[in-house]
Amino acid sequence: MTAAAASSTRVDAGPAPGLAARLWRDRRARTGVIVIAVFVVGAVAGPPLLGAAAPLHLADVLSGRFAAPLSRTPDGVWHLLGTDGFGRDELGRLLLGARISLAVGLLAALVATSVGIGAGAVAGYAGGAVDRAVVAATDAALAIPRVPFLLLLVALVEPGAAVTVLAIGATGWMGVARLVRGEVRAVRSRAFVEAARGLGAGPGRVLWRHVLPNALTSALVAAALGIGTAIMLEAGLSFLGLGVQPPTPSWGNMIAAGRDALMIAPWLSLAPAAAVALVVLGFSLVADALDAAIAGERAG
């Protein structure tokens, strides 16, 4: 095929799809977004709008406790996912737990991503002693086992949602920092960055306006994966009693609360465990699709 024919073929094929179009064409991205959206809508809408009973209301405990899914309690209230040992609606508690677990996961991932982007950008752009110091700090932090350190950290202070967010965020920035540092080092020597310096732009402006926007694609994938990881870590900490504390429901402490009744009411642990698995799977699918879309964008 001649060069002219090849050029004509490329023109006839039309412009290459953008990153958003590539992402949405991926079935994994659509599936992940739908799964996440279902839980987000449920968490925001809350039990009343979705027909769930009051999740914190204690009615007749003896007659309403451990009602099976798709059944009615003696007071005539129908429960999609049954009730717990105190007669509280399991679906309503699952939706309230979604608010806590999703919020903790998103905020913890935001903390980790922000710290990682800041540290990686400064190290990659400054170079020299600053770069070596940040790399040394990152390597030292990576050498510490995350889960035992998290358990120690949250055990030293009063457990709660805020402490969980800070603990997970403070132990999850290192991978993002290494990714951003590598991208910044690759971008900082490009012609448009040199042109910005030649026009008199200071280091801060060059980094913020020209380098970072072209170096954050890998950080987006890491952030999507980080949200799922943070939700799992929050569930684990709350399961052990070191995260969100009852009576505030989170998926982790709901799993823990149902473990003593696994033989007579397995849905109490299975429902929040399934919610954790589905949400983490949703974010993993989005991250995989985003990674593939970025690779296609670069190749195109």
Image (cartoon, helix red, strand yellow):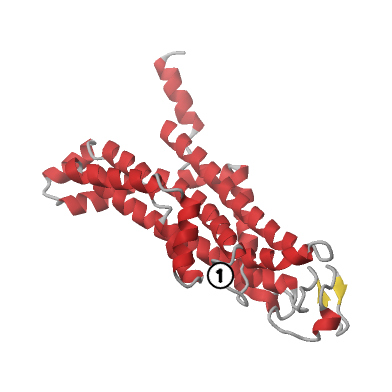
Q: Nearer the viewer, residue 16 or 126?
A: 126
Depicted 107 relative to depicted 225: above or below: below
Q: Is residue 176 left or right of residue 291?
A: left
Q: Is residue 91 left or right of residue 44?
A: right
- Which residue sits at x=88%, y=83%? 74
Depicted 189 relative to depicted 248: above or below: above
Q: Is residue 215 visible?
A: no
Q: Is residue 176 visible?
A: yes
Q: Could you tell me the amino acid type at mark 1?
A: Val
Tell me where residue 133 appears, x and y as whole percent: 23, 46
Q: Nearer the viewer, residue 246 or 35?
A: 246
Q: Quadrant of residue 64?
A: bottom right
Tell me where residue 270 appears, x and y as whole percent: 74, 59
Q: Nearer the viewer, residue 296 or 168?
A: 168
Depicted 233 relative to depicted 288: above or below: below
Q: In the rendered view of the protein, which quadrant contains the C terminus?
A: top left
Residue that numbered label 1 is attached to: 244
Q: Is residue 66 left or right of residue 188?
A: right
Tell me where residue 86 appears, x and y as whole percent: 76, 79
Q: Is residue 200 left or right of residue 32?
A: left
Q: Nearer the viewer, residue 205 or 15?
A: 205
Tell me where residue 202 appears, x and y as whole percent: 14, 52
Mark 1, other Cα within 10 Å: few <14 / some 14–19 / many ≥20? many
Badge count: 1
Residue found at the very far top of the displayed protein: 1
- Which residue sits at x=80%, y=71%? 82
> What secondary structure is marked by label 1?
loop
